[in-house]
Image (cartoon, rainbow, N blue to C red):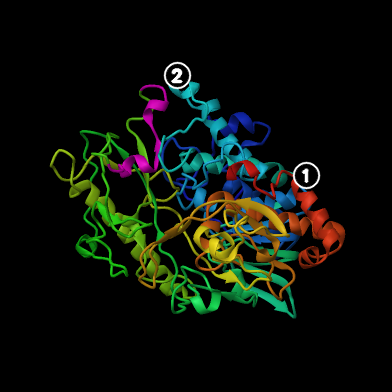
Amino acid sequence: MYRAPGFAISSKENFITGHYFCITLCKLKRKHFISSLGVGTGALMGLNNLAAAHKLQKSLTSGTREMKADVVIAGGGMGGCAAALATLRNGLSVVLTEETHWIGGQLTQQGVSCPDEHPWIESFGATKSYLELRARIRAFYTGFYPLSAQAKAARFFNPGNGSVSKLCHEPRVALTVLNSFLLPYLHAGKLELLLRTKVVAADSSGDFVHYMKCRNLDTGQEQVLKAAYFIDATELGDLLPLAGVEYVSGAESKSQTKELHAAEVADPKNNQAFTHCFVLEYREGEDHRIDKPENYNFWKDFIPPLKPSWPGKLLSLYYSSPSTLKPKKLGFDPTGKTTEGVLNLWNYRRIIDHRNFKEGLYKGNLSLINWPQNDYFLGNIIDVDERTFNKQVAKGKELSRSLLYWLQTEVERPDGGQGWPGLLLRTDMLGTADGLAQYPYIRESRRIRPVFRVLEEHVGKENRKQVASAADAGKAASFFDTVGIGYYHIDLHPGTGKNNYIDFDSLPFQIPLGALLPQRVRNLLPANKNIGTTHITNGCYRLHPVEWGIGEAVGAAVAFSLQKKTEPHAIRENEQLLKDFQAYLEAQGVALHWPEEIYK
């Protein structure tokens, strides 16, 4: 059996046989298949341990602890995967590290498999590869799941029929599809994938990074990774301080940015809440209540100390309406019925609607729990030591477990009762023994000090009216160095600075190359939420398709730079190079401008 270097193979781990991978990847020897985790039954297994084992076996058995590639990417989330694909398809070699068991970031190991997208996503408004990702996820269901007649007839099949997204689905399906994107390059020897591996150090001098050091989180074994370019696609911008890249964090003040919704006083420690997501199934008539969490009474009675104030206890069916901050009632009924004219939270992020599948396939519907009630904002996880980080993450998990227990035992029911004991925590859905996501859902990161910073006046609807001409006030700023597009309203969840929601309209925007370039360092680029936005504008640049677009633009910039024997900063500084690079992007399916029809 191949063992992922530095990975312990538990007795529960086994070969993958008798499912999709054995059909579609039958040319691979069975010994190459080991499961990506040791929990769950009947679930699709990822290819992650295969990826970790495939190419690294030779290097580690020979005793070397140094690896070289054209590009090293730290972080295998949406931006990291997109950056890897963009560099790989343009002929470069890549080492991709990821500290969890799964690639995919917020779409998979963080559990948010109901991607936050804009209204036009079914036809345009994202890169060709992102639209292909969505298409492959749908095709997996239509090709391998026994669907009902109504599901087969749907123009845009939505597995969960969740109201938040047009493609609510199971995280493992997204994982499977992402692995299918990477597998050809893995087997061709172009990609090295290091899972359960975290960047821990970097060496830099002058304006260049020379190498980074990573550590296997299971064994402690370290490796040095060398490359011409480094990409920080970690969830929190972890490579930036290690490599000496200038960055900011938290909230800027009005005096610093002149933004309409900026804070009066800057607070570098004020970052958005993170959330530990989980998946529930409802099985009527059954009892799946968990043990009462140790600190449940604290969370049961907890009233968020926010300004403006929160309308009562966190564990309740009232919350602050994000746009008005007025109390707003919610409903909860896991049978899926409508709840007296208010949003049924169960249907909001439902990832499986059993009506979409052959009768009897699913015992009940499945819903992803990523709600206001399990947003954790009592402690910061950026620029803290490892002990503090782990302590805050543990408290976030405790809140999620307390929310589950409250739903099972105390939440008000439409029939006047309390609690739904039939709610089952699906511990097989997210690749963990406790059923909670492998990593917290991250909304905010360290951010580079960029060549160009995106401000609210560039993308905020109200602020734009104050600075733009009458002809341009209804459009976001047009950037001469655009390398992509995106759209989402500016959505900031309560923060560690004890602020309530900040939520308001934005305009369909562009991604400027200048926001992807550090002011000083020349061969390290950001590819996640760590780009040159502000605390405010991060609120619309942090979502699934935008993060993917950022990663793809960064990967393409690196590939183009190596091909032209130049560097990303020079692309922006040279009119002809920039024009050629933008044509390079468009030829690969990256839209640079929004169609005029969306403004009509």
Q: Is residue 342 left or right of residue 492?
A: left
| Residue labelled with disc 1 | 587
| Residue labelled with disc 2 | 149
**In the structure shown, which secondary structural element does the residue marked by tag 2 occupy?**
helix
**In the structure shown, which secondary structural element does the residue marked by tag 1 occupy?**
helix
Q: Callout 2, which amino acid?
A: Ala
Q: Is residue 189 visible?
A: no
Q: Callout 1, which amino acid?
A: Ala
Q: Please determine whether, in this image, residue 254 is positioned above or below residue 87.
A: below
Name the quadrant of the N terminus: top right
- The residue lying toward the viewer, choosing from 131 and 435, is 131
Q: Is residue 497 left or right of residue 299?
A: right
Q: Residue at x 15, y 45 (%)?
A: 418
Q: Please determine whether, in this image, residue 233 is positioned above or below residue 243.
A: above
Q: Is residue 202 visible?
A: yes
Q: Residue at x 26, y 39 (%)?
A: 341
Q: Work out whether mark 2 precedes mark 1 in sequence or the reverse, and give the earlier one.
A: 2
Q: CA distance from mark 2 to mark 1?
A: 38 Å
Q: Position of residue 425 (x, y in %)?
A: 32, 45
Residue 481, located in which quarter of the rendered image? bottom right
- The residue lying toward the viewer, choosing from 404 and 152, is 152
Q: Nearer the viewer, mark 2 or mark 1?
A: 1
Over which residues does the magenta segment extend?
342-359
Q: Position of residue 121 (x, y in %)?
A: 56, 41
Name the quadrant of the C terminus: top right
Q: Is residue 116 left or right of residue 23?
A: left
Q: Please determine whether, in this image, residue 151 is positioned above or below residue 171.
A: above
Q: Position of residue 41 (x, y in %)?
A: 41, 38
Q: How many marks?
A: 2
Q: Position of residue 406 (x, y in %)?
A: 22, 52
Residue 54's disc number: none
